[in-house]
């Protein structure tokens, strides 16, 4: 299966009845136990009437380390591979690598729309 077919399967499993998903991105820099991803997921678990939203959250992983961590803590993970670019480290605002990562994310979000899904990106 190609990357879009895999993505469509993940999105279908996570989508609400109206084909809406919640998307966030994750890389190695933010994936360690006790880091921001754990706080993010916990906020859904303890929020008022928000725990069911976790069923509709897809974590877009930007490197192999983050997808391994994601799969150990969440049910809807997708590895967004980008040929020739390493997005595992933190990218500082305005740097060339940061801009590459943002453009890759925009292209990815366009693909989600083209597959017929709506999304909330956080």
Image (tube, grey):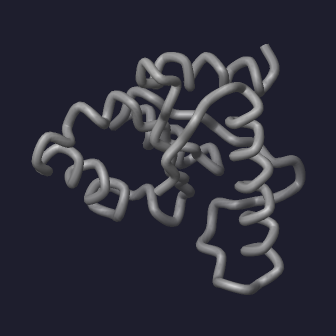
Viewer-proximal residue among 48 and 90: 48
Q: Say left or right for 96 vs 53.
A: right
Nearer to us in this view, 11 or 29? 11
Q: Give residue 118's quadrant in the image.
A: top right
Left or right: 34 with respect to 83? Answer: left
Name the residue: 53% across, 48% down. Answer: 66
**On the picture, is 103 further left or further right than 120?**
right
**Residue 23: x percent and y percent?**
51, 45
- The quadrant of the image that shows the N terminus is top right
- Residue drawn 81% across and 48% down? 82
Q: Relative to residue 39, is residue 119 depicted above or below?
A: above
- Residue 56, given in percent of the width and then of the height, sits at 39, 31
Residue 112 image position (x, y, % from top left): 68, 36
The residue positioned farthest toward the front in the image shown: 18
Of all residues, the one furthest to the top in this rendering is 1
Task: Establish if 72 lies above or below 92.
Answer: above
Q: For this rendering, which residue is in front, 91 or 43?
A: 43
Look at the picture and state if 26 lies above or below 35.
above
């Amino acid at each position: 299966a190609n990357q879009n077919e895999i993505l469509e399967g993940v999105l279908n499993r996570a989508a609400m009845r109206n084909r809406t998903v919640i998307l966030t991105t994750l890389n190695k820099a933010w994936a360690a136990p006790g880091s921001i991803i754990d706080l993010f997921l916990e906020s859904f678990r303890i929020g008022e009437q928000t725990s069911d939203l976790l069923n509709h959250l897809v974590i877009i992983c930007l490197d192999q380390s983050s997808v391994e961590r994601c799969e150990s803590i969440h049910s809807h993970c997708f590895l967004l591979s980008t040929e020739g670019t390493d997005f595992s480290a933190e990218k500082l605002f305005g740097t060339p690598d940061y801009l590459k990562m943002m453009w890759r994310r925009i292209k990815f979000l366009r693909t989600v729309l083209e597959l017929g899904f709506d999304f909330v990106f956080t």
